Each structure stands twice: as C-alpha cells, then as structure tokens.
Image: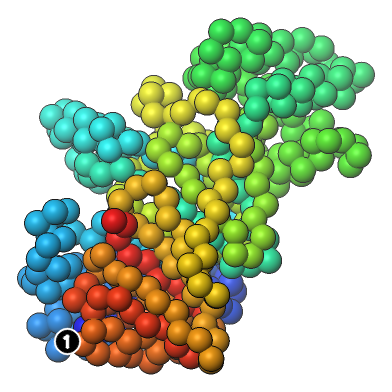
Amino acid sequence: MFVAISNTPRDYAWGSTTAIAGLLGTPASGAPEAELWLGAHSGSPSRIDDPAQAGGAGDLVEWIESDAATALGAGNVAERGARLPFLLKVLAAGGPLSLQAHPSPEQAQAGFARENAAGIPLEAPNRNYKDAFHKPELVVAVSPTFDALCGFRPLAESRDIVKELTVLGRADAPDPTIFDPFWERLSGPDPLRSAVEWLLRSGRESGAVDALVERVMQIAGSAPETSRFAVDYATVRSLAASYPGDPGIVLSLLLNHVTLRAGEALYLPAGNIHAYLSGLGIELMAASDNVLRGGLTPKYIDVEELLDVLDFTPVDEPLLAPETPSAGVHVFRPDVPDFVLYDVDASADTSASVPLSGAAIALCTAGTVTIAGAGSSVTIARGDAVYVTPDEGTLAVTGAGRLYLATVGE
C-alpha cells in the first residue's frame, strides 16, 4: 500500500528561508524552514493525507499505534518492535547547527535508564537521553556544496594550526602566552580529550578559554588567505558571527571541515562530533532524540557525558561511498540495521529496482516517477511523499525524475 504523507517544515532559526521550498516547489513561508520531517517521530509525525487509507489515523504515529502489523509488517514488529526505526529529513542549513554527538545503543540504554531513575523529566532542559536508542546519521548533499564539521582531524594538523595561530598572534599579542594552556593539553597525554575538556570546562573556570576564543577570533579576522588553514579561519569567522565568544569556535579547529558535492554523503556514527554549517541535504537517521551538545548553542551542555560519548580517535573525512547496482541508482548503506537510503535518478527508458526489507518512505524532488509494488502502484511528482508498507516487496521505479527512498536495513 502506498499512503500519501505530508508535513510542515520546522522553523529553527538556523534554517534557510528558501531552500526547502525551492527543492519541493512549494510556496516559501518567509520564515526559516530548517527541516522537513518524514516519519513517525512524535516530535513532528507525518500527516496522512487520506486517513481512510490508514483506518482513520491522522498521522503515522497514530497508525502505527493502532495497526502496527499493517504499517510495519508483522515480521518487523516481532523483530524490531512496533516503531519505525528511521526518520527521513530534508535539511536546509542557512547557518551553523550546534556541535553535537550521539550515543551508541549501549550508552543510550544506560543513560535513559539512569536519568529515569534520577527522576529527570523527559522535557527538562538538562535531560540528555529522551529515549533508549542510538542516533547514527547520514546526509546526502542536494545543493552544489554542503559544508560540515565532522570528526577529529589528524592530531598533527590540529597541532600545526595552533602553532600557526601562535605565530600569527605573537606580534601584537597583549599576552604572548595565551595559547600555552591549550598547547600543553594538545601536546600531553590523551591530547584531544584533554583539550576538549579544558575548552568546555576547566579552562572556562579561570577565564583562560574566553581570552583564547577572543584572540582566535581576532587572528582569524586578518589571517592570510594563502595559509593552508584558510578554510578553517573562514569557518572561525562564520561561527563567530553567529556565536561570538563560544568555545566551539576553537573546538572547530580540531575537526575535519568537509565540503560535499551534490550526490556525496557523510555518515556519522556514534561518538562522532559534528556540526552542519551550510547547504541543502537529504538526511536519514535512526529515530531518536539523544543529543550531547558540545558548543555553538545556548542549550544545555553536559561536559562529562559528552566526554564519555565522544570518540576521540582522529578520522579521515567520513564519506560514505554508495553502491551502484544499476544505472541511476545509488544506495547508501551504513553499518547499522536501522536504515538504508536509495537515491534514484529515474529516466524514461529504464526501470530501477528497490527491494524492501521493511516499511519505506519515498520523496520525489524532481519530475514525475511511478513506483510499482506487488499489490499496487502510485505516481508522484516533485514535492510529493508516500509511505510504503512492506508487503509491496520489491519496488520498480520508472518515469523521469529524482526519488529518495528510505527503508530499514537488513
């Protein structure tokens, strides 16, 4: 069964005012439109356009609660529980999001139980764990470029940029030793953990971090464009415009700056610290609200819990290469069972095959495509989305258009 669904974009302040409307061909509201959620997340469940298709349910949460066997498939309910394990989003970053990381399944289960036992209300601002699930994420760039900070860069690069900042700031620095405490931590044992802890906690108590952030902002404002770290200094300037004085500005220097081209993807597993900076993308994640923040936000930061969750192992850019089973089909398959993303560029003379192992959500972003399953078919155009029940089996996609389809992994 194919069930038409829709939703209203979330109006977070960092959202673009034009990108989502431009992609889907809908009228722009004039307000920031940051994320369009397609899924059964209680925070913004997708509406069912024709409730009669779903036993009268008005949204996906209601339908799954009333008839999970139909919506999810009896086998999936027995194996995974009566919940849709993924959430598909259109994400439009007009400005930087917060630095954040997400827990592993084991950390999420332990943290959720611990905070429940402590009596912390689910909606309390100091609540870290809203549920017992992990929250890995992938994002595919739709705009020509999509910029993000993600994962700790090689330690030698972090040390080199601090050395260069020290040299650039030495000439007119009122305090030539301002970088010393940060450098000591980057040069000592467990350097990245020590440096992050100092930036977010111990160094702030003495005022040393505030002074360092201010100095880094000043140096980045006049740093030479020929520097090998020119992109990092540009990021500092951008972050400083949105979050002046935030320790996350200096923390950003320890991270990989990745610029995706359209069609490229990032995969962010548990423990990977990241922040999307700008661009339009299709994001697919496990359906969870568990976020540990590390800066660039006025929201609560639990430094101790963040340090426990973060993976401080330096990584290369965490790009996720797609499988290409046939022409025009790219499959982004991370190492978790929660989700898989199909990016289908359909042409009139071909048929793309998409096997389902559970429920799916499909979004058309260009042209018109027909999706045919075992029992029925549907034709959707730019801006349309449908929920697909798993009994449709392997889907055939034809037409001329672009389709993003999220389903569960195997």
Q: Residue furthest front?
A: 325
Compare residues 308 and 340 and report the one nearer the observer: 340
Left or right of 121 in this view: 180: right
Q: Quadrant of the N terminus?
A: bottom left
How many marks on residues? 1
- Name the residue located 67 percent from the left edge and 32 percent from the top edge: 253
Reply above or below: 83 against 71: above
Give x and y (percent) for residue 190. 53, 13
Give x and y (percent) for residue 258. 65, 47
Quarter of the rendering containing residue 198: top right
Give x and y (percent) for residue 6. 34, 79
Give x and y (percent) for residue 210. 63, 24
Q: Quadrant of the C terminus?
A: bottom left
Left or right of 226 in this view: 6: left
Quarter of the rendering containing residue 207: top right
Left or right of 259 in this view: 172: right
Reply above or below: 373 against 104: below
Reply above or below: 84 against 248: below
Whether residue 246 is visible: no
Compare residues 107 and 261 and report the one nearer the observer: 261
Q: Secondary structure at mark 1?
A: helix
- Name the residue located 24 percent from the left edge and 66 percent from the top edge: 358
Residue beneath label 1, please?
Answer: 53
